[in-house]
Amino acid sequence: MLGVCLRPEEFRPGWDFVELQFEKTVSFKPEWRNASTKFAVHSPYYVSLTSPKQQKVDEAINKIIDSAKVGEKLGATIVVARAGFYSKRTPAETMDDMVRNCRETTRQLRIQLGIETQPRQTQFGSLEEVLQLAEKTGIVPVINLGAIRARSGELDIKRVLSRVDEPYIHFDSSIDLEALAAALPRKYTLVAEDAGSAEKMRALL
C-alpha cells in the first residue's frame, strides 16, 4: 500500500492511503470519513513518552489517545508517535521507561501503536531500539528511512526492510526510490513524507 503524510489542512481526496499528521492540536472533520481513503494518524510531534516528568508522559499518552480516537472514526488501524529524547539518562534506562509507557498507552488504545525511528543520537529511536521495543511490547516499528540514514550515516534499504515483516515505512525525496521499490517485500505500507515523492514512487510500483 502506498500513501502520503498530510497535515489536516492539506487533506484532499485522491490518495488511497493518508497518514494524517497532527503537529500541535488534534482535530476531526466528518467529511474526511466520506472520502474513499484509508487512514493512519500521527500524534503531535512534541509529545514525550521518555520525559522524566510524569506529567509530561501523561500528557503524551493523552495526546496519543486523542489522536487514536480520531483514527478510530476514520477506520485507521494505527496511531504513530515519536518517543522523545533521552533527557540525560542512558539508552537502557530510557528503554525501561518506554516499555512501561508503551504498555500503559496500548492498554488504553483500540488501535495499534507505532513508534517511529528518529534521526538524532539524543533521541530514543534507533532502528535497534524500535525493533527491541516492538519485541517487548507489541508496538509496530515505523521505519523512517531518512531518519535511519541521518542517525547512522548509512542506509542499506534491503537489509533494513528484511528485518520487519510487512514493514510500515516512511520515506522522502532523499531516498533512492528505485532501490526502495526493488527492496519492497510482498506486503508493506509505504508512506511518503511529501506528495512529490509519493507521485514518483507511484510511477515505479
Image (cartoon, rainbow, N blue to C red):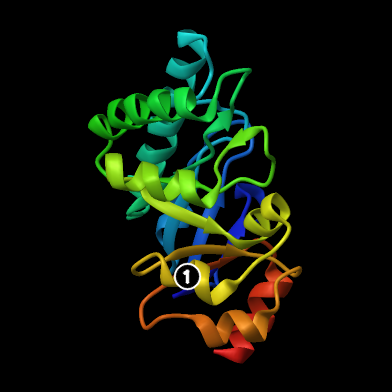
In this picture, residue 48 sits left or right of residue 102: right
Mark 1 lies on residue: 161
- Which residue occupies the foreground of this view, 67 or 28? 67
Give 65 or 183, whichever is nearer the viewer: 183
Residue in the image at 35% along x and 30% along y: 99
Q: Tell me if mark 1 has few (under 14), some (14-19) or many (20+) residues whose alpha carbon lies within 10 angstroms of its own.
A: many
Image location (x, y in percent) of residue 145 = 61, 62
Q: Nearer the viewer, residue 63 or 174?
A: 174
Mark 1: which secondary structure? helix
List x then y, in percent, for residue 196: 73, 73
Q: Locate residue 199, reporting x and y percent.
A: 66, 80
142 lies above or below 47:
below
Identify the residue shown where x is 41% and y is 23%.
97
Foreground of the two, 148 or 26: 148
Quadrant (top left, top right, bottom left, bottom right) of the N terminus: bottom left
Residue 113 can be seen in this image? no
Location of residue 68 (image quadrant) = top left
Taking 10 as reference, is 36 above or below it? below
Q: Residue at x 34, y 47 (%)?
A: 134
- Disc 1 residue type (three-letter): Leu
**Residue at the (68%, 50%) spot, across then down:** 151
